[in-house]
Amino acid sequence: MNPPPLRSPRSPVAGFFVGLWDLMNFTRRLIFNLVFFGGLLLLAVLFLAGSLLGSRSGPKPLGQDTTLVIAPEGRLVEQYTSDPVTRALSKAMGDGGHSEVQLRDLMSVLRAAGKDDKITRVVLELDKFSPSGFASLRELGRAVDELRGQGKQVVAYSQSMGQGQYLLAAHADEVYLDPMGGLMLEGLSGYRQYYRTLLADKLGVDMQLFKVGEYKSAAEPYVLDAASAESKEADLYWMGDIWQRYVAEVAAARKLDVAALNAGIDTLPEGVIAAGGDLARHALQLKLVDGLKTRAEFDALIAERGKADEDEDRGYRWVGVEGYQAHLARSHNPLDSRDQVAIVVAEGAISGGKQPAGSVGGDSTSALLRAAREDDKVKAVVLRVDSPGGEVFASEQIRREVVALKAAGKPVVASMGDVAASGGYWISMDTDAIWADESTITGSIGIFGMIPNLSRALGKVGVSTDGVATTRFAGAFDPTRPMDPGVAQVIQAVIEKGYNDFIGGVAAGRGKSVEEIDQVARGRVWSGVQAHERGLVDSFGGLREAVADAAARAKLGSDDRWRIRYIEKEGTPFEQFLAQLGNSPVGAALLGRSGLADVLMLGRVLPQADADLRFVQDQLQQAGPGQPPKALAHCFCEL
């Protein structure tokens, strides 16, 4: 064994600087730890103070003749796409730029208000509301109709609204618009950008497309300069059905003649010109609204009908959605031991692995279904689907968990939201029953795959690819080399196999022959009504009807013998701590004023531009070097 090397003694100067560095390093760590633990202590104090004061004050008691004001801000979603911490801190900072509204929250307050003697009317203010599709709007509309049937007056007001917001507003007893506002019913459209000239002619990037189904148009923008005839035929067919249903629903709600309403829409330019360019006046002439009122005039109208209160900013006694939810939460029993119908939400594009809320992960969504299967209190499951599809394998992972639930003796019912197409249909096809709205976008049963060829693009800048391989197909999926025709045949065979698996699974799940399913598949998109006519959907209804069906299949008895539970990913204890801090009155105020929320909030939910095309791009990027592209079951069919 060799002796350790001898160290030469430090010079006094070197020793001084080393000692000085050690002192500075110790001081740095000490200050950091003091700041870190001081911050934690501050958070704890804020949380405890907020919780204490919040528990003392509680929600504001409801007085008689209270008006429930529903003024949703943001995009309507099935499930929040941001975590509780981000939402709480955003609220503390007063940042409503990326707000979301859960459909379940609006439905719950509408239904509770119908049974609440202290709520006499509901005001809908929809200026900042961003609907995601017609199926969810129709579900809300039915809840408004039910509320009116229970004797509650519903009044809608807006400064200016689009046709999506108006579909909900039309269900109110009365609709008022600001005199300077506007409303136009213009119809539905579906336009996309096409990139073949840019990619192939300008950049030299050749996109190799493999698909089954002449109507499977999701990847057409990469290989064509305009929509194919099949794409236009299919899109116009389902869009026309949904639009005619929209017009009929508005006409019925407003007691208008359908033909007259259609005529008013078709003669929009002439009507607006005749109204002197006044969109609000034009809407009044078409009887789409009952009157034109400023905000002050509308508030005065509600105060006259309700309980006037000069201390309230609106001039009348009212409660908002959050305040009313807090009031309802007081009656919630956290120790409720009744049997459960679990709801698992599958919203967004389907990708492999673990994905955050607002998207569907092969691993993460499967884990939620598995948790429902392993929980003895869960007796039935509703899979709430609002997805245009995505990866085939990830969709298959989720489908297998549905089958495992059924094998465990737990009924599974699919409830389709605004969109449940392609991969969204794949994960639904083996459920015991499929519920959809008449305006749900579904179908698109087809498969495609893409791989780019960059050899011409590289050649334009003087780059070439060369080398050796041990077999004919080694390196065959390298995008910098021209694709061998044999490789193309392999990929097409894989895509065809995926399509046969898809229609075979649908046939088995729907009790039909493969030939029958192939006739209504081939990538074609259908409305809910059209899908029902072709045997792809069992019944019409929303989430409530699907839950009732699941409970009946599990033989759970009357409604009071079981309860609904959403199974979602729970935050860590620290995340829950921060979320409760941000939602407490004192914590939110102090966080907003101190700027601490700015420090804690390391990321923001960014708006996604052109999400569909970026989804395909992500799939291409996920295929590593030498790997073939993934088979995709995706539909660019959202309105």
Image (cartoon, grey):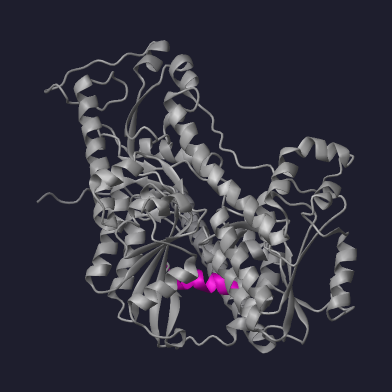
Residue 12 visible? The answer is: no
Is 404 drawn above or below residue 393 in the view shown? below
Residue 580 drawn at (x, y percent): 57, 74
Is residue 578 on the magenta stretch? yes
Magenta-highlighted stretch: main secondary structure? helix
Q: From the viewer's perspective, tell me whether residue 264 is left or right of residue 373.
A: right
- Count of numbered marks: 0
Residue 60: image quadrant is bottom right
Q: Is residue 115 visible?
A: yes
Give x and y (percent) for residue 73: 67, 60
In this rendering, position of residue 24 left or right of residue 285: left
| Residue located 77% across and 77% down the image | 318
Residue depicted at 66% across the width and 68% down the height: 591
589 relative to 135 in the view: left or right = right
| Residue 632 position in % (x across, y down) | 34, 41
- In depth, the one of 104 and 168 nearer the eye is 168
Q: Nearer the viewer, residue 105 or 504?
A: 504
Residue drawn at the location 68% of the way across and 63% of the way down:
171
Q: Is residue 320 above or below residue 489?
A: below
Quadrant for the C terminus in the image = top right
Q: Image quadrant of residue 347? A: bottom left
x%, y% of residue 474? 17, 26
Comparing 494 with 206, the one in front is: 494
**Is 463 displayed left or right of 109 in the figure?**
left
The answer to whether residue 492 is magenta is: no
Taking depth in this image into account, of 362 and 540 the one nearest to the observer is: 540
Up-down relation of residue 542 to residue 577 (above or below): above
What is the span of residues highlighted in magenta in the rendered image? 569-581
